[in-house]
Image (cartoon, grey):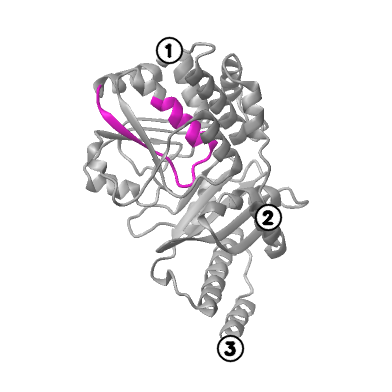
Amino acid sequence: MDRKSKVTEVLEKHQGEKHVVILHNYPDPDAIASAFAHRLISEQYDIQVDIIYTGKISHSQNIALVKLLGIDLLPFDDTMALSQYHGAVFIDNQGTMTNGIVSALESAGVPVVMVVDHHEPQNILTAEFSDIQKTGATATIYTSYIENGLLAMQKGRKEHTAVATALMHAIMTDTGGFIRADTDDFHAAAYLSQYRDPNLLEHIMNQRRSKQVMDVIRQALENRTVVENHSIAGIGYLRPEDRDAIPQAAEFLVKEENVHTAVVYGIIKEEQTEVLTGSLRTSKLTFDPDDFIKEVFGVNSEGRYYGGGKHQAGGFSIPVGFLTGNACEEFLKLKWKVFDAQVKVKIFSKIGVKPDLLHQQHQLSQSTG
């Protein structure tokens, strides 16, 4: 049975239900656009869809995408009545970076209906239907669904123009402006070009970087350590709304001469929680971000990896846990030094470089002295 027939079968089986679409934390254009497409497709089967995420929509392009296209997203919190949903759909992720939503769904007894993603298989979720393809973007997969008849596109129809524009933007951003695109991505873009709004797309793509993002990039430049063609930069504490500056900083650092891989990380402070969050970017074709992140950072107490990746990019998210909080500035500085040193030790070990532990221990003792 082909994928289109399988998706049709699954949606027909769940006709008339209410589903929740789960995006990874701090969702990017690929996740947002694909979820929007899934909602429109689901409407054909009388399936009501809510789209939820953790973190914030903070990247200027993502804010423009959501506002200009009128895409409704719901921020997740622990008080959400998840039991109202008949099923869950994971899009552009497989549950590795959803900040507790997987366990919350399990507790509420909500089964996983679909997983649609283009990252490496994570083997965490058991779904009725999984479509995990090695394409440049999850948006490419959803475009193929639409082209094969799951949504009858009409030129000039507002929501169809919006979804085509969103999917085109997603493919462009996830393939680096088609530099990393494959045949399927180009085919999807050609199909979408019939329906997208070029002026709206240009407006979304041309959002300027904020001062906060530029400051984070500056910090990454100042703090970077370059060893064995890897650029590693810790940038300290960040506000949740500045989280999207981390991958932008990684994209900036990987363009330095004699650098093929960049890792940028910081601690995101959100109310009562703190999370060590990082992004990896690489220009080395033989480098596997998924294996690298999994081997460096390992798994949590439930056996789930702290992160993963796809072709030339990856990310990780590690709860700070017991050490979260404390108003004392000296404690915060000391805590950051410990986490910064630990990340570097793990990365150095992975790439075969012996870290200068004595120097790091000296820095820590200096901070407490």
Residue 102 percent coordinates (x, y): 32, 46
Instruction: Give the mark, 3 or 1, whose residue is nearer the N terminus.
Output: 1
Name which residue type carries label 3.
Gly
Name which residue type carries label 1.
Gly
- From the image, tell me which residue sits under label 1: 149
Q: Quadrant of residue 193?
A: top right
Q: Is residue 282 above or below residue 218?
A: above
Which residue occupies 47% across, 75% down? 327
Q: Is residue 276 magenta?
A: no
- From the image, tell me which residue sits under label 3: 369
Q: Is residue 317 above or below residue 18?
A: below
Give the extent of the magenta segment: 16-39
- Asked whether disc 2 touches disc 3, contact meaning CB atoms under 8 Å apart, the reply is no
Q: Is residue 2 visible?
A: no
Which residue occupies 34% across, 47% down? 101
- From the image, tell me which residue sits under label 2: 217
Q: Is residue 93 above or below residue 164?
A: below
Which residue occupies 34% across, 30% down? 49
CA gap, disc 3 and disc 1: 68 Å
Report crowding for label 1: few under 14, some 14 to 19, many 20 or more residues within 10 A (C-alpha).
Answer: few
